[in-house]
Amino acid sequence: MSNVKKLIEKHLPRIIEIRRDIHSHPELAFEEVETSKKVVSVLSELGGWDIQPGVAKTGVVAILGADKPGPCVGLRADMDALPIYEETKKPYASKRPGVMHACGHDGHTACLLGAAMVLTEIKDELSGPVRLLFQPAEEGHGGGKLMCEEGALENVSAIFGLHCWPGTDRGNVALARGPAMASSNAFTITVKGKGGHAAFPHQTIDPVLVSAHIITALQSICSRSTNPLDSSVVTVAQVNAGTAHNVIPDEVVMKGTFRSLKLETLKMLFERVPLIASKTAEAFGASAETEIFDGYPVLVNDIKASNYLAGIVQDTVGSGRFQDNEDPVMGAEDFSFYCQNIPGAFWWLGMTPQGQEPISVHTPRFDFDDEIIPTAVELHVEVARRFAAGWS
Ligand code: NI
């Protein structure tokens, strides 16, 4: 057994304890005050870390071996929870009704702290600095973007991060090279017509009917305006209108998201969604305005960073548990902001025992799998330990 593996075994009970403690005390985006304090307190206890709290409001950056001459490697974990009522019935379930760690960020944070424990003990083996990024607000609020803007990537040559992955077998590492996760933008379409009595539709301009046409027409974008070999998604997820079964309303408000894996497809979505909405509405004598909100860019795994990571995965977990060249997914991740600035690779760690039905992230029964902690910690540590030799 390698020294790193032995050290992980030694620290494992403490890492699990931290993971469950964070799980019990979930905090929403940019409110990760207690989680952030916990991170700072564990790192302070370890000693040797230059700790910077308050980066991106509630984020923490910590550096080990700042004076070492080799290139600096970045490792990132996200810390925020989701507005969901937990139904796991676990003894360490959320103590905050309506808030829960339903995306495993409790596990990500604990595993990076676990890596810090091991790295502290093998500090002499490191040839370059290690920078840990504990970021806030991954869930739709772009904490990663703010971390970049506030200098969290200073002097970092490459960055690596992981997400626990229920759709993949427990302990397997999956890597998509190149585009790995989609860009994501939310939109709101407001359709304005003219309300009236449901029995006299000819005296109205029915925005409900107009909206139905818009929803249908929007689906032509992915099926007819993009290359069939290029993936994109347009989803209308929310439709709000009306007050009674016999009243045609004045207005319909629809909310949704569009996603793509390529910049040119994204540009096309930015143009086509508002155009289809407004022109369809116009044809019926109504009007439609589209507001598109800032989102996450596509997450592109750098080739060199992917190669470096793949070598370490082969060496540690072995090729039998390595799902290389996985297909990208249309979920989004704000790790993409780091990858826009420096080379990076984001990998997935499977967490569902073989043959079992996966419980999806963002659902009330989801819980991070403590069994995958040793693999997560080992890969973090090895990525950092071998960086000076393996990256240049
Ligand atoms: Ni997540």
Image: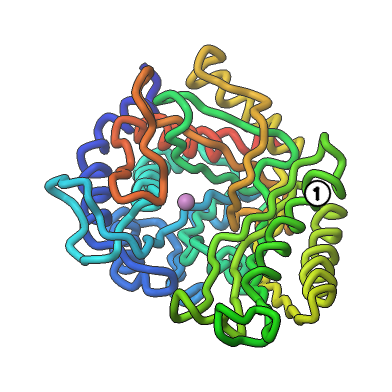
In the image, taking residue 386 as reference, residue 103 lies left or right, namely: left
Circle 1 is placed at which residue position?
Answer: 262
Q: Residue at x 59, y 58 (%)?
A: 334
Where is residue 196 shown, x and y percent of the image? 59, 87
Quarter holding the N terminus is: top left
Image quarter of residue 248? bottom right
The front one of 359 and 140 is 359
Q: For the view shown, which residue lies furthest in the front direction?
A: 199
Is residue 69 in sight in this rendering? no
Q: Residue at x 35, y 52 (%)?
A: 102
Image quarter of residue 84? bottom left
Q: Residue at x 27, y 29 (%)?
A: 9
Is residue 251 in sight in this rendering? yes
Quarter holding the C terminus is: top right
Q: Could you tell me the amino acid type at mark 1?
A: Lys
In the image, taking residue 57 as reference, residue 91 lies left or right, namely: left
Relative to residue 353, is residue 373 depicted above or below? below
The front one of 235 and 156 is 235
Circle 1 — which element? loop
Q: For the view shown, which residue lies furthest in the left direction?
A: 91
The front one of 37 and 266 is 266
Report crowding for label 1: few under 14, some 14 to 19, many 20 or more residues within 10 A (C-alpha). Answer: some
